Image: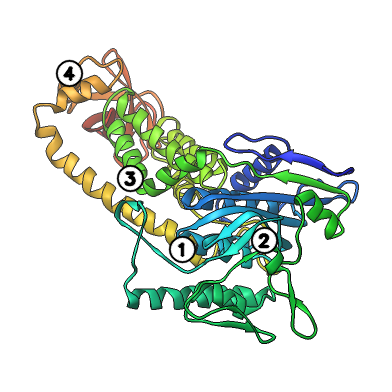
Amino acid sequence: MTTGDKTIASRGLADSVHIPYFTAMRTVKMIGLFWTILLLGFPGHAADENSSTLVYILPIREDIMPPLKYLVRRGVKEAMEAEADLLILDMETNGGRVDITEEIIEIIGRFPNKTITYVNKKAYSAGAFISVATQEIYMAPVSVIGAAAPIMMSPGGMGTQEMPSTMEVKITSAISALIRANAEKNNYNVDVIEAMIDKSKELVIDGEVLCEKGQILTLNNSEAEREYGNPPQRLLSSGTVENIESLLQKIGISDSVIVHIEPTGAEELGTLIHTISPILLIIGIVGLYIEFKTPGFGVFGIAGIAAFILYFLGSYVSGLSGMEWLLVFFVGVILIGIELFLFPGTIVFGLLGASIILCSLIMGMVDIYPGSPNPNLNPNLPSIPDLTPALANLWITMLGSGIIIFILSRYLPKTSAYHQLISNSASGVACIQEQMENHESMTGRTGRTISVLAPGGKARFGDAIIDVISDGELIEKGQAIRIIRFNGPGAIVESV
């Protein structure tokens, strides 16, 4: 590390250094403006107090697979929120899946400032694609880049197999178009990039055949930085440097704050949770529905809450959002609780709580990046494409939950296991049948209100004082009433 450089390790699953600041600010923004989802932007992290250049280093290691996508998404968002001046990809990979590569390229393209790839040993296949998506490429001594032709994995992911010719042509054409667009954007030689992808291309520069037809171009660091043409232009690499500290010196950065994005095993967990997120929501909704329909609090309520927490945890780990949306979700739950237990029948708290919960479930899956290329737009306002995947998941959830709840409400009470199931899940209740019999005996009884029912309140029936709800009308204190039915544990009454 050169003199003047300072290094910070960024968080994995747990926050450290300046990251709690971001989480706190995001939480304040989310809770304060959930109703319209128009979230106010906050100033970026002031890491540059002494005019230091803020540099984020993002490792691209192992295979290009979903866990890496989550790491890249998290790293880019942290760099954007911190208003980093430079993002460096520390590259050492054999390649990986094309679809994940495309998503990673799109994510990196959102970073508004300078991007550099440092090929630290090798950037094969998908690694070469991602490298071209950055503005400059530097390479370590004895490093290589290229061999980017698409291949097809054999069933089970063990080894490769020959790709049908028609499929190979289609995939090569699609990838070539994507990489050409990035090469042109970042001023790379398009012919060099195509020679790495398409073996039908021959690369000839200044009369020298650099890659024969039928071969795939792969370059070592010396070959990649050779100059060709008039005026001379380097083939691909901007230079060879020993390490990232030397790279910073070469590009004229002498005083920098360096933040390393550290990968964690949590990204693997995020892959699974993100995949089953609609199932988790269905479990959460059905679990809370059963809990609401049964007395006490037991296993269904615990399962429902755990499913919702896992849903938001998956979004957090995969880099889609912070845990602030979990807090917003619980704000909605609290408001619904106020409606049910403190001000029954007011509707306002229930509607507000339901709206907040719906907002949190959608926004927990929306991929929003700090900042905006258009200063006239709110930087945190999601677009329709941003909302589409989350809305699709929510639609699947509502459909699945509706079907399961319908089946449970129609057939579960008729089964012999129903009462035992409810009994075991509800704490403090000996038998659901006992409560049902009590409701039947109370139905039709008359009593007198001891508070105004607007529409909820209290009434006396003999020696018992219970919570009651009027059947739509305001009933004054001291009025005679009759129980006409029960809705869960609550008695519905009418004036006599």
- Regarding mark 1 in the picture, which secondary structure is present there? helix
Instruction: Look at the numbered disc 3 and give the secondary structure of its residue.
Output: helix
Q: Earlier in the sequence, mark 2 or mark 3?
A: 2
The residue labelled by disc 1 is: 98
Question: Mark 3 and 1 residues: CB-CB less than 8 Å, in contact?
Answer: no
Q: Is residue 311 above or below residue 378?
A: above
The residue at 36%/28% (across/down) is 302
Distance between mark 2 and mark 1 Cα atoms = 21 Å
Specify the farthest residue to the top.
463
Residue 125 image position (x, y, % from top left)? 52, 63
Q: Residue at x 67, y 56 (%)?
A: 142
Q: Quadrant of the N terminus?
A: top right
Check the image and report above or below for 364 versus 289: below
Q: Nearer the viewer, residue 222 or 461?
A: 222
Q: Earlier in the sequence, mark 2 or mark 1?
A: 1
The residue singled out by tag 3 in the image is: 279
Q: Earlier in the sequence, mark 4 or mark 1?
A: 1
Residue 31, image x, y percentages: 59, 44
Looking at the image, residue 21 sits to the left or right of residue 307; the answer is: right
**Disc 3 to disc 1, C-alpha distance:** 27 Å
Q: Secondary structure at mark 2?
A: loop
For marks 4 and 2, give the CA distance.
Answer: 63 Å
Reading the image, the residue beneath label 4 is 434
Which quadrant holds residue 341? top left
Give the residue at mark 2. Answer: 111
- 345 versus 144 height, above or below: above
Which residue does the image show at 45% across and 40% down from the upper left? Answer: 269
Q: Nearer the viewer, mark 4 or mark 2?
A: 2
Task: Say what amino acid the circle numbered 4 marks.
Answer: Glu
- Nearer to us of marks 2 and 3 is 2
- Give the amino acid at mark 1: Val
